[in-house]
Structure formats: structure tokens, C-alpha cells
Amino acid sequence: MDAMNMRTAVIVDAVRTPSGRGKPGGALSGIHPVDLAAHVLRATLERNGLDSRQIDDVLLGCVSQVGEQTMNIARQAVLAAGFDERVPATTIDRQCGSSQQAAHFAAQGVMAGQYDIVIAGGVESMSRVPLGIAASVAGSPFSPRLHERYPEGLVNQGVSAELIAERWGLSRDDLDAYAAQSHARAARAAAEGRFDSQLLPVPTEAGEVTADETVRPGTSVEGLAGLAPAFRTDALAARFPDLDWRITPGNSSPLTDGASAVLIMSEEKTNELGLTPRARFHSFAVVGDDPLLMLTGPIPATRRILERSGLGMDDLDAYEVNEAFASVPLAWAAEVGADPEKLNPWGGAIALGHALGSSGTRLLGTLLATLEATGGRYGLQTMCEGGGMANATIIERL
């Protein structure tokens, strides 16, 4: 299919659960991740008057695919949601960008003429399936041949965030000020009802969860300054003597439970069903980058997608850059010449949480709502990913 005949892939809806703290006692910690994902799948159908048999495929991101999140959680969620048994589903792991990649695959399938209606989304219950548990169950992925290539070993993301802060000259104050701003922006957006179009209340034994649990409205730089660095060990301090260890729980994204989904269709199918397309997928990029620095991928991903799309930074009206750690969007903004006012204008993952497999379509839903609220035309989403990769997406509001 040549570019002239390529179909247009559009977003019809975007939904998400509120964020729950990803630890025992968190607002969503009593809910099995399969059921959390099923909740957003069911809502996607109901909000749009669809029958499950109309869905060609369900693509969900999930990172820690062990325990309750094994056995292709997307398929389990489809069945738990009461979908027709003939609806297929698959689970995608591109680390923190898993559901952004799910949206890419879904949209690209529509554009290629292979899908008419797809749900892309993601889920992660970090309270029930803790981060890092996968590598503790049956050995480490760091193989002998990988060790030959990286004899000193790769590092965890927190150390990568430290290396980025050091390289880009971001002080502890810079990081904490950015984190406090993320909470302030998210609290203001919530108070103004900005998330209402996406948020799905979740019934739990303790009552209905309607708001993001990870947002802390009163967060101040002074309060954050009292927190100790989270990732320093004596061994790492010896390996990286130049680091002064500035990354804390306060300027990092919190462990989070959540699920999200976007409804993606061909433009023809929306017309046929009388549904309203809200945005179209304009451009895509995915890159690999230095696995030691790990979280710098959004910089080359942004350069590549701008080159491919023919757009410049000035053409973009909003950008959602995942706040895995404060140093990531700050280094990105410095490199690509971003406008700080357009960067995560409603707060980011530091405040809204980072439920790994779900974050991609959470950011996409936030970006869509931001463009709609501001009358913007083009929006960019980009996310750093474990192993040193990044996805980038540009959407155009319709």
C-alpha cells in the first residue's frame, strides 16, 4: 500500500483509571491487574456504544510479566471484561513505553489496512507485582555475552538519571523545583477538571477511587530538600566518583498502580459508525540509545520524528515527556529547545504516577485532552525506556 492510499488512523477515545500508590495499602492495591485492565477495556466499549465483536485486536503494554501479570495479561483482561471469546489480544513489553508502542502497532495496523478497530492500552500493578521481581525469580537477563560487551555492567534507571543530571549540569534545586512544579500543575489541572474526560472511577472494597492518589498538592522545594538520595551505594559511588547523588524519591516518579486505553480506528470506520475522530496519528519514531545513560533516548527520538514529519519544535503545541525522573525532561528540553510552558502542562509522572505498562496510553490521553482544551493542533509524546530506547509519537487534533 503506497503512501497515497495509506489509511488514516484516528483516536476516538482515551480512558484511564486514577493512579494508585504502588504499594500495599495503595488505593488500587486490592484489585488484580487483570481486572484493572478489564475495567478500562469494558469502559472503552460502553462509552462508545461498541460491541466487543467489532474489535479486531487488543494490544496492551505490561512490563513485569510475572505472577498475576503473566500468561498474556491482555488476553486474560479481554476474557475478564466479558468480551466475545473470538476477540484476540497480545501483550507488549517495550519497558516504560510499552503502551505507547501498543498504540504505534495499533495505528500502524489500521494504516496498513489490517485493522479497522483496535484497543491499545496498558496495565501495571506495582503493589502486587513489585518492580524488579521478574529478575529475582529465575535468574538475571545479564548474560555472559552481554557481560563481555559491558564488563562493568549496566546500571539501574536511578543511576542513569544521576548520570544525566551530572552531564547536563542539573542541580538538586533544579530537580526538586521541577518536581514541585509537576505536583502543582497536576493539582491545578485536577481542580479544573482537566482529567475528567479520561478518568474512570474504580470501585473498591474501601469505596470508589475517583482521583489520582499520587498527586501531592502541597509539595514544596523546601519539603523535597529534606529527602535522601535513593540510589547511592558504596560500590556505585566508587564506580562513579563524579556523582554527588541528587535523585531522591521526591524528584522521581512514584511506584504506581493503574491501567489506561485508547480506542483507535480507521477514519472510514468512524464515519460508518457515526463516531467522532478526535485526533489522527501523524508520525512515529522509535530509537535505541546508550544503555548506560539509558534515559536519553527521547532526544534522538524527537530529532528523528521531527525530521520524518517535516515539523519543527515551533509547530508543536504541547509535549508529553515521561517524567521517570526530573532529570529526563529537563535534559530533553535543554537539548531540543523546548518551551517549558508546553512541557507536561498538566503535570507529569512525578505527580500523576508511572504505572509502567500503562503510562504510554496515559500520556497519549493527557496529550489529546491538552490539545482539545487549548485548541492546539500538533502534540508530541516521547518516553525513555529501560535498556536505552525511546518511542516518539506526533498526533494532530481534528
Image (spheres, rainbow, N blue to C red):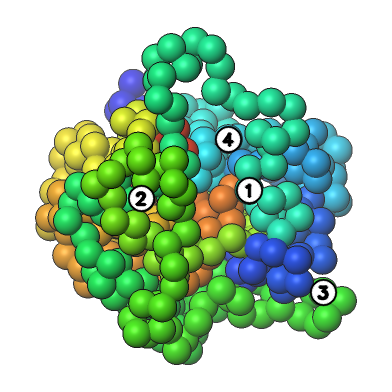
Label 2 vs 1, first from the N-terminus: 1
The foreground one among 376 and 92 is: 92
Label 3 vs 4, first from the N-terminus: 4
State the SS at label 3: strand
Label 3 vs 2, first from the N-terminus: 2
Q: CA distance from mark 3 to mark 1?
A: 23 Å
Residue, x 52% and y 54% (percent of image)?
A: 359
Q: Nearer the viewer, mark 3 or mark 2?
A: 2
Residue, x 15% and y 49% (percent of image)?
A: 335
Residue tagged 2: 161
State the SS at label 1: loop
Q: Position of residue 48 (x, y in %)?
A: 65, 61
Q: Position of residue 174 (x, y in %)?
A: 24, 69
Residue tagged 4: 93
Type of amino acid under label 2: Ala
Say left or right for 231 vs 321.
Answer: right
Type of amino acid under label 1: Leu
Q: Is residue 145 visible?
A: yes
Say left or right for 350 vs 116.
Answer: left
Residue tagged 3: 204
Task: Mark 1: give few (<14), some (14-19) or many (20+) Cα within 10 Å.
Answer: some
Say left or right for 131 vs 3.
Answer: right
Label 1 vs 4, first from the N-terminus: 4
Type of amino acid under label 4: Asp
State the SS at label 4: loop
Q: Position of residue 397 (x, y in %)?
A: 34, 59
Residue, x 69% and y 42% (percent of image)?
A: 133
Label 2 vs 4, first from the N-terminus: 4
Q: CA distance from mark 3 to mark 2?
A: 35 Å
The foreground one among 220 and 50 is: 220
Residue tagged 1: 131
